[in-house]
Amino acid sequence: MNWAAGLIGRRFHYGWLTVAVVFLVLLAAAGTRATPSVMMVPLEHQFGWSRATISLAISVNIALYGLMGPFAAAAMQRFGVRPTLLIALGTMALGVALSSLMTQPWQMVLVWGVMVGGATGVAALSLSATVVTRWFTTHRGLVMGILTASSATGQLVFLPMLAAIAEHYGWRQVVWVVAAAAAVVLPLVAFLLPERPADVKLRPYGEPHDAPVAATVTKQNPLAIAFGTLAMASRTRDFWLLFFSFFICGASTNGYVGTHLIAMCGDYGMSEVQGASLLAAMGVFDLFGTTLSGWLSDRFNSRVLLFWYYGLRGLSLMYLPHAFGIDFFGLPLFAVFYGLDWIATVPPTVRLATDVYGKESAPVVFGWVVAGHQLGAAFAALGAGMLRASLGTYTVASMISGGLCLVAAVIVLRINRPAKVPQPQAV
């Protein structure tokens, strides 16, 4: 590890190489987690499974993806980032490869829901929060925006390629491509990812030279860390405001649009590749939107940013059912508008969590908040599938999702607001 730091030199902080490695890890993990949305229609055709049945496996995947967050952050504190990531990436590659043998719905729930969902939950937003708080004192919002953008972009950008492979060669070839991509990032983590800046004889980027040295890896049990932090945070109002607003964030992104948009496009006569291309375009715009959101969160009030993000997202989701009826500009307008806002909520949310709970506790607290995000996503993935199966359309699901975003826009304005101190009346 020291040789890599020596090659980079003094003018370029090793933290930026750490960001590059984690960027690729998040890209691979997010692309893996999003793969079932491409497989939904092929599995429906080959095995006769209903969308509600497939959505169950996806909802388990999404729920575990979120529930692993606080435990992953605690395990990184106890055992280190590199060992935790290596185990998760190995499990992810193995689980994806095993799914090529599945023939029954329970097997999809076990492999894609439990194994892949749990493994990708380690390489998720909690990893980003851990790396940002360890390696950066300044530019935290910008770096969190970059890493968050990689997570969202990985879910979307690779979908057209995977959809084309599924269309021409079958869903099993998609599985092998994704398993290989997960395996490729293993050596990058093994050889290029230090635990902390002190391991390469550096301080966090932007930290003064006279600042106290950060604490080393704790000896406390990861379960004790995770649940102890939850017990502390759950006694505060801000935690529940963060949790429920992020629940709505997950329901309106990964759970609904990320899972069902390709199938929704099929209801309007569009091919899987066309639907996946629409998601990919949204991913490209998200790369800019979320990175910009990180930059803005370093400079402006995070509550106000979140108010606008949730409000505009809600309006765009209410517009979505009408977009299919507009010949040329309908869906591209939605892709640009919604894509810029896809997951721009993450940097301001991390900033608020850090401001409220401090640098050391923030990654684990944010892990629990991400659990709320993915529970909301699981709720929307299953609920939208059930509504589509019963009503034959996604319109009601779109309106519910948009309405929830407007509720979140109001909730976030109450986070981390100082208590009003009564002023003494003049005599």
Image (spheres, rainbow, N blue to C red):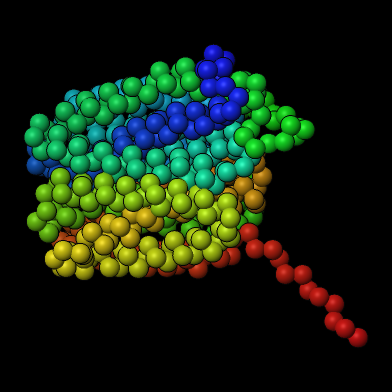
Quadrant location of residue 21? top left
Relative horizontal placement of residue 358, taking residue 48 as reference (left or right) = right
Quarter of the picture containing the N terminus is top right
List the single residue furthest toward the right: 427
The residue that appears at 60% across and 24% down in the rendered structure is 10
Residue 240 in view (yes/no): no
Along the line of sight, which residue is nearer the eye, 237 or 5? 5
The residue that appears at 38% across and 46% down in the rendered structure is 287
Provide residue 25's location: percent of width, then percent of height.
40, 30
The number of callouts visible is 0
Residue 161 in view (yes/no): yes
Relative horizontal placement of residue 244, taking residue 100 as reference (left or right) = right
Along the line of sight, which residue is nearer the eye, 15 or 64? 15
Relative horizontal placement of residue 359, taking residue 306 as reference (left or right) = right
Q: Is residue 28 above or below residue 423?
A: above
Quarter of the picture containing the C terminus is bottom right
Provide residue 46's location: percent of width, then percent of height.
9, 37
The residue that appears at 57% across and 43% down in the rendered structure is 140
Q: Is residue 355 above or below residue 19?
A: below
Along the line of sight, which residue is nearer the eye, 83 or 70? 83
The residue that appears at 45% across and 42% down in the rendered structure is 146
Quadrant location of residue 252? bottom left
List the single residue furthest toward the front: 11
Provide residue 238's location: percent of width, then percent of height.
60, 57
Along the line of sight, which residue is nearer the eye, 67 or 277? 277
